[in-house]
């Protein structure tokens, strides 16, 4: 007699809390965090979703690392110079990728490496950042095109 196949393993859906100090709609969230969250949600077939807490809703910028370690936030955008109490500590944190990674790990956080396909998604998202920014600034009657051209000219002159 043949047995029916076992039902597929059902995982509990989870919602991860993303905290940051940036205002809602900030370019870093829109072009980094948002595509990351969409990528994870898609890759997990909706099993993992996110709740975003911008503007220091869960805590001050300087406390983001500790909020993550304590489980108040599951993920956080951490600005190293805001996270350290001393200049010495900040320098150690920013001194080389290996040291930064080790410090993050020592605080109980997991470092996720992005694969080539993930990097392509981010590269595609970033290609239009400058043009979109310039258009938005120009629409508001500000000199976005002029400022950006001055910036790119200065960059070119420095190399």
Image: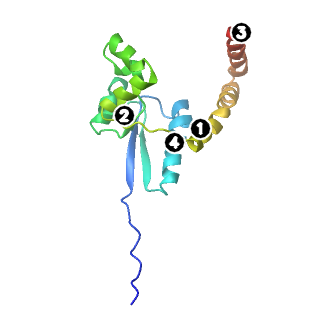
Distance from Cα at disc 2 to Cα at disc 4 = 20 Å
Identity of the residue furthest to the left in this view: 70
Residue under circle 1?
Answer: 122
Residue 67 location, quadrant: top left
Identity of the residue furthest to the front in this view: 1
Q: Is residue 86 above or below residue 124?
A: above
Cβ–Cβ below 8 Å for labels 2 and 4? no
Task: Mark 1 or mark 4: name the one nearer the start of the chain.
Answer: 4
Query: Residue at left 43%, top 56%?
Result: 47
Residue under circle 3?
Answer: 157
141 horizontally vs 39: left or right: right
Residue 138: image x %, image y %?
A: 70, 25
Distance from Cα at disc 2 to Cα at disc 3 = 41 Å
144 or 5: nearer the eye?
Answer: 5
Query: Residue at left 52%, top 53%?
Result: 42
Which secondary structure lies at badge 2? Answer: loop
Residue under circle 4?
Answer: 36
Distance from Cα at disc 1 to Cα at disc 3 = 28 Å
Distance from Cα at disc 2 to Cα at disc 1 = 26 Å
Task: Mark 1 or mark 3: name the one nearer the start of the chain.
Answer: 1
Query: Residue at left 36%, top 59%?
Result: 12
Residue under circle 2?
Answer: 57
69 or 132: nearer the eye?
Answer: 69
Task: Mark 2 or mark 1: name the one nearer the start of the chain.
Answer: 2
Distance from Cα at disc 1 to Cα at disc 4 = 8 Å
155 horizontally vs 48: left or right: right
Q: Is residue 132 above or below residue 9?
A: above
Residue 133: image x %, image y %?
A: 65, 28
121 horizontally vs 6: left or right: right
């Amino acid at each position: 007699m043949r047995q029916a196949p076992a039902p597929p393993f059902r995982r509990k859906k989870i919602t991860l809390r993303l905290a940051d100090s940036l205002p809602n709609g900030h370019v870093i969230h829109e072009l980094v965090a948002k595509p990351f969250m969409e990528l994870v949600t898609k890759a997990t077939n909706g099993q993992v979703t996110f709740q975003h807490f911008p503007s220091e809703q869960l805590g001050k910028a300087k406390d983001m690392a500790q909020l993550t370690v304590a489980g108040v936030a599951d993920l956080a955008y951490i600005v190293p110079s805001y996270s350290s109490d001393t200049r010495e500590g900040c320098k150690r944190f920013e001194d080389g990728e290996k040291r930064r990674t080790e410090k993050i790990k020592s605080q109980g956080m997991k470092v996720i490496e992005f694969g080539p396909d993930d990097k392509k998604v981010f590269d595609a998202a970033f290609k239009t950042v400058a043009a979109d920014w310039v258009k938005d600034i120009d629409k508001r009657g500000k000199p976005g095109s002029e400022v950006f051209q001055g910036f790119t000219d200065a960059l070119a002159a420095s190399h």
